[in-house]
Image (tube, rainbow, N blue to C red):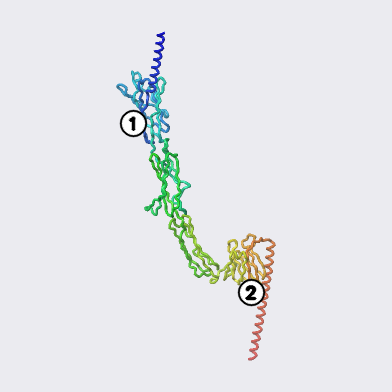
């Protein structure tokens, strides 16, 4: 019974010893770095040598079958840069390459088979060195697996790698709804600015730190005044893409420049372009004059006009007529206008009067008119009455276009009128009412009535109308024309006959006088 108990105790002790040995094997393996402890710190995109030492205590070399080093995502292994140095081997050191499959670098014990049979050789402080490049800043861990012959895997991931951000923020740009046009000229007192920026950031929250937007006012390239209305945005631990907006208001006219400086939390800095803006809310100044003291129909008026703008400058040519119209007697205006680059428009005018005296001008039907009576739109609508001599005319406007009604013939009972710019002739008897379509739209536009004729003047009334032209109205107008023509012919024949009798009587008188004188002699 005692013997049996002793056997059981021995088995239990043996089992405990085996467990302790196993635990010792499992927990005796660590991975650490020969250069400065347990972490690396390198800059992004630089090729760096990583030297990882495997320290396995109390484990014979022949009990290790494989060592795997897994690289984090974003790391690129450089082919043929890896090497393993098996140190602490009595009387010799062995350097061999290890293979890479994807992101895993692997060393196997088979590569140094000649050492496996050496008694009590240990894999103690053996380094695995290789070159790799990291593309993205951040903090990472290398996973190191040591696989023993009994299938046990000892894993450690406490090899810390810090990749520093050395890339400045990018895409620093002026975007809408802020101003984006270089050299813009604006008629306003504000400058809205929005800046966007991108930074690659890190997985530890190290992104953009700040955006500083500055506004300067300057009168020349070498005389710059800083405005206190600049703005600094603090953007700690924000996303990789961010923006800042400010609207500088209450600004005076002048030239301005704006720029932005962006910092990330790693101290990398980038600047925007310098945006130049001109504010101008004042229209150009005009200098306008014409030599128009006394103007008759047909005279020449000469005008000059110039423009100046102290801030944005005058855009394009100044608009004005060098020689305003004098083709008809009227109270007229001459105009001048200009616009600056900020869109401010300036305009002015001068009044001048063209009288009917002086050189006469010809209009419509070859008739020479010596005087023009100008009818306003209000007078035309209400009805305008005027006594007009032969070779005088009345000027009206229909739908903004100028037309004239001139008297070209006059008897004691009839008046012949010429309506132009589209020439139309009409003879009216006293009391006649006539209608005229002056723009060929099948509607009568002008109503004329011959009220009376006295003192060699036709008393006429002119009025604006809008009446449909029909076959019936055309017939009526033709009948009136025929009647007036007939009356005018009869009056002319009567007048001619009267003159004939006068001539005969005068001739008879002269013959009689001559006969009497001869008889006295």
Q: Image check: 441 left or right of 57?
A: right
Residue situated furthest bottom in the rendering: 521
Tell me if residue 421 comes above or below residue 413 in the rendering: above
* Residue 467 placement: quadrant: bottom right
Q: Tell me the SS state at disc 1.
A: loop
Task: Name the quarter where the C terminus is drawn.
Answer: bottom right
Tell me if residue 503 comes above or below residue 282 in the rendering: below
Label of residue 454 in the image: 2
Residue 176, can we see it?
Answer: yes
Task: Judge the density around disc 1: few (<14), some (14-19), many (≥20) Cα neighbours within 10 Å.
Answer: few
Label of residue 36 in the image: 1
* Residue 39 placement: quadrant: top left
Nearest the eye: 428 or 492: 428
Give x and y (percent) for residue 18. Answer: 39, 17
Task: Name the quarter where the N terminus is drawn.
Answer: top left
Give x and y (percent) for residue 233. Answer: 42, 44
Report the residue at 43% width, 58% height from top: 310
Tell me whether the residue at label 2 lies in contact with that at label 1, contact meaning CB atoms closer than 8 angstroms. Answer: no
Q: Tell me the SS state at disc 2.
A: strand
Give x and y (percent) for residue 38. Answer: 36, 30
Q: CA distance from mark 2 to mark 1?
A: 126 Å
Report the residue at 58% width, 61% height from top: 400
Q: Tell me the mark number nearer the camera, choosing from 2 and 1.
A: 1
Residue 427, can we see it?
Answer: no
Label of residue 224 in the image: none
Tell me if residue 9 comes above or below residue 107 in the rendering: above
Give x and y (percent) for residue 219. Answer: 39, 54
Residue situated furthest front in the rendering: 2
Nearest the eye: 469 or 462: 462
Q: Image check: 207 left or right of 448?
A: left
Task: Judge the density around disc 2: few (<14), some (14-19), many (≥20) Cα neighbours within 10 Å.
Answer: few
């Amino acid at each position: 019974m005692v013997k049996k108990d002793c056997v059981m105790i021995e088995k239990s002790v043996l089992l405990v010893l085996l467990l302790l040995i196993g635990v010792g094997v499992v927990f005796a393996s660590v991975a650490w770095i020969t250069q400065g402890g347990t972490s690396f710190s390198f800059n992004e995109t630089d090729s760096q040598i990583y030297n990882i030492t495997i320290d396995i205590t109390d484990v014979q070399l022949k009990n290790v079958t494989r060592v795997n080093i897994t690289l984090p995502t974003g790391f690129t292994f450089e082919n043929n840069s890896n090497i393993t140095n098996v140190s602490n081997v009595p009387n010799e050191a062995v350097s061999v390459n290890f293979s890479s499959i994807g992101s895993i670098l692997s060393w196997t014990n088979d590569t140094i088979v000649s050492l496996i049979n050496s008694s009590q050789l240990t894999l103690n402080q053996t380094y695995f060195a290789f070159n790799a490049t990291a593309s993205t800043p951040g903090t990472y861990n290398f996973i190191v697996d040591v696989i023993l012959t009994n299938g046990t895997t000892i894993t450690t991931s406490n090899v810390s790698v810090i990749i520093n951000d050395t890339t400045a923020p990018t895409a620093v740009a002026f975007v809408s709804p802020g101003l984006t046009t270089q050299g813009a000229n604006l008629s306003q007192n504000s400058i809205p600015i929005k800046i966007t920026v991108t930074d690659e950031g890190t997985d530890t929250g190290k992104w953009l730190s700040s955006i500083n937007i500055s506004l300067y006012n300057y009168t020349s390239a070498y005389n710059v005044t800083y405005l206190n209305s600049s703005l600094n945005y603090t953007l700690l631990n924000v996303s990789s893409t961010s923006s800042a907006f400010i609207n500088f208001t209450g600004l005076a006219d002048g030239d301005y420049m704006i720029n932005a400086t962006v910092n990330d939390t790693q101290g990398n800095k980038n600047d925007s372009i310098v945006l130049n803006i001109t504010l101008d809310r004042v229209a150009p100044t005009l200098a306008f004059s014409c030599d128009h003291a006394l103007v008759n129909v047909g005279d020449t008026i000469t005008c000059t006009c110039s423009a100046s703008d102290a801030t944005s400058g005058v855009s394009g040519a100044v608009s004005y007529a060098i020689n305003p119209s004098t083709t008809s007697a009227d109270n007229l205006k001459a105009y001048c206008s200009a616009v600056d680059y900020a869109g401010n428009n300036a305009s002015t005018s001068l009044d001048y009067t063209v009288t009917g005296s002086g050189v006469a001008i010809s209009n419509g039907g070859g008739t020479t008119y010596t005087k023009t009576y100008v009818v306003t739109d209000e007078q035309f609508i209400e009805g305008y009455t005027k006594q007009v001599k032969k070779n005088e005319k009345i000027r009206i406007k229909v739908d903004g276009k100028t037309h004239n009604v001139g008297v070209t013939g006059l008897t004691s009972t009839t008046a012949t009128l010429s309506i132009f710019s589209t020439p139309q002739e009409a003879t009216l008897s006293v009391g006649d009412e006539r209608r005229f379509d002056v723009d060929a739209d099948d509607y009568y536009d002008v109503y004329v009535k011959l009220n009376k004729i006295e003192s060699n003047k036709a008393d006429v009334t002119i009025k604006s109308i809008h009446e449909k032209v029909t076959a019936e109205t055309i017939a009526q107008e033709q009948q009136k024309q025929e009647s007036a023509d007939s009356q005018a012919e009869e009056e002319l024949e009567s007048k001619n006959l009267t003159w004939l009798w006068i001539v005969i009587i005068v001739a008879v008188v002269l013959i009689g006088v001559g006969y009497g004188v001869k008889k006295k002699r």
